[in-house]
Amino acid sequence: MMIPFVKMHGLGNDFVILDQRNNPHAFDSQAIRKISDRRFGIGCDQLITLEVSNQNQADIFMKIYNADGNEVGACGNATRCVAFLLKEEDGKAHHTIQTKAGFLSAEALNDTQVTVDLGAPHFQWQDIPLSQEMDTLHMPITFEGLKDPATLSVGNPHLIFFVYDVESIDLVHAGENLTHHPFFPEGTNVEIVEKVDDHTLRMRVYERGVGITHACGTGAAASVVAAKKRGIIQTPAKVILEGGELMVDYQQTVKITGQVTLSFRGSLNPHIFRT
């Protein structure tokens, strides 16, 4: 039996979404890598599975797997895409989505714009997590001209460098070397961020387990939070990404708003699950 899937993206950050609520399929990291492969599979930054939540306050349980096959706790753009599908399914604008990192509140504003509240960011070194205690707003990390980064978690860890020109940085080289820095036992996403004005940032991202992506919702959120904490910008703020723009507001919690797109629906050959 063929397995239905939905291909979606949030500003070019793309996902294969499998609904596991009625007909679950067991699969391993090798199958995830096959599905995510852009030449031999469907191709995506992350594979998303939807399951029944055992918590009354949640409408659904969402699992997130990077293209390398490893499960992660949060993905802002994927959450926005799932919220879009839930509205399509039941007609409701508001949903609570359970993830490995906790519960996220989402609102579909219209047919293309979705807001997700990622909750309160975490700055304590144990919560990111880091391998040792240190000042998380001014990390003792340097790499080929990059220096004085901030780090925090919004369900997953981010290492954020502020630079004068994001295009001047070899992000592939930096990301490959920093995503598994010894300070980050679980690895980290790496962002380079440029201030445009008091309410605008430009950002590029290297995602752990994926590589460079067109957008990262939690990365945009983390960058705005770090920039506000350092007095660089005020919120709400716009984040310009390769795939488009996200609006980020940070008060007690951090919210991201942006466009989602349903690219196509298809059917997956179950042979891909076999090694």
Image (cartoon, rainbow, N blue to C red):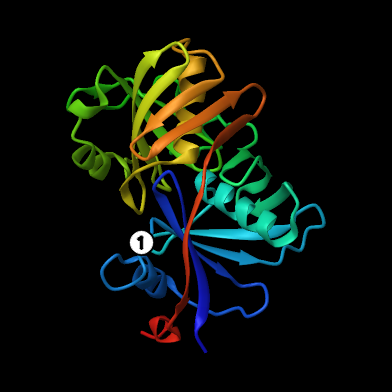
Element on which disc 1 rests: loop
**Residue 60 versus residue 245: which sits nearer the camera?**
245
Residue at figure coordinates x 42%, y 54% from the top left: 14
Q: Position of residue 109 (x, y in %)?
A: 66, 40
Q: Is residue 154 left or right of residue 60?
A: left
- Which of the 4 image quarters holds residue 198? top left
Residue 189 is situated, as x and y percent measured from the top left of the image, at 38, 41
Query: Relative to residue 21, is residue 138 depicted above or below?
Result: above
> Is 199 located above or below residue 212 in the figure?
above
What is the residue that sits farthest to the bottom in this orientation?
1
Residue 80 placement, left or right of 134: right
Q: Which residue is mark 1?
A: 68
**Does residue 166 show up?**
yes
| Above or below: residue 22 compared with residue 241 | below
Which residue corresponds to the image point at 43% horizontal and 19% vertical from the top-left? 200
Residue lying at 68% horizontally and 52% vertically, measured from the top left: 97
Counting every numbered tag in the picture gives: 1
Which quarter of the rendered picture does the C terminus lie within?
Answer: bottom left
Q: Amino acid at mark 1?
A: Asp
Q: Nearer the viewer, residue 237 or 121?
A: 237
Quick one: which residue is furthest to the right in this view?
A: 56
Q: Position of residue 220 (x, y in %)?
A: 46, 32
Q: Horizontal placement of 154 versus 53: left or right?
A: left
Dot 1: within a 10 Å radius of its alpha carbon, few (fewer than 14), some, or many (20 or more) residues?
A: many
